[in-house]
Amino acid sequence: AALAAAVLPVLASLVGTVAGSGVPPIASSTNLQKQALVRLQRHPEVCLALPDAPLPGYKPVILECSAAAPNMRFMVPDIGTRGWIQSAANPALCLDAPGGPKLQFWTCSESPADNILWHIDE
């Protein structure tokens, strides 16, 4: 919990390391995406996760990574490209940066494009 409290305010600048799953790419509304875990660069042992039964406006959580956890599976753009980070369990929800250090999950079709486009680094 303390680690999550320390990293959530700066998550937007840390997201970037993507661990692929070998799951075949799927088509999305922005570009070709694959399912992956989203790890924090400074703490690769923890991953971005959705709370249980997420709804628009829910905040992301940071948990110990588990490839088997469905709430940690995201559809992400290819490394080196820009695109949406969508929940694999609920693809209508995108990781949204509405301003400042805040992050939330919001309906992809209702979010301003600048809020939901992410550049994925190695």
Image (cartoon, rainbow, N blue to C red):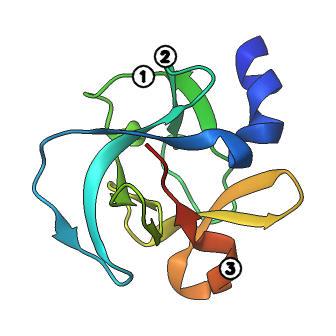
Element carrying mark 1: loop
Element carrying mark 2: loop
Q: Dot 1: within a 10 Å radius of its alpha carbon, few (fewer than 14), some, or many (20 or more) residues?
A: some
Looking at the image, which is closer to me, 78 or 10? 78
Q: Is residue 12 above or below residue 107?
A: above
Between the residue at mark 3 and the residue at mark 1, the CA separation in whole angstroms equals 28 Å
Task: Spot the residue most to the right.
Answer: 100
Question: Is residue 33 visible from the viewing direction of this image?
Answer: yes
Q: Dot 3: within a 10 Å radius of its alpha carbon, few (fewer than 14), some, or many (20 or more) residues?
A: few
Asked if residue 103 lies left or right of residue 88, the reply is right
Nearest-to-viewer mark from 1 and 2: 2
Q: Is residue 2 above or below residue 110?
A: above
Residue 42 drawn at (x, y percent): 63, 23
Q: Amino acid at mark 3?
A: Asp
Question: Where is mark 1, residue-wise?
Answer: 65
Question: Where is mark 3, residue-wise?
Answer: 114
Question: Where is mark 2, residue-wise?
Answer: 45
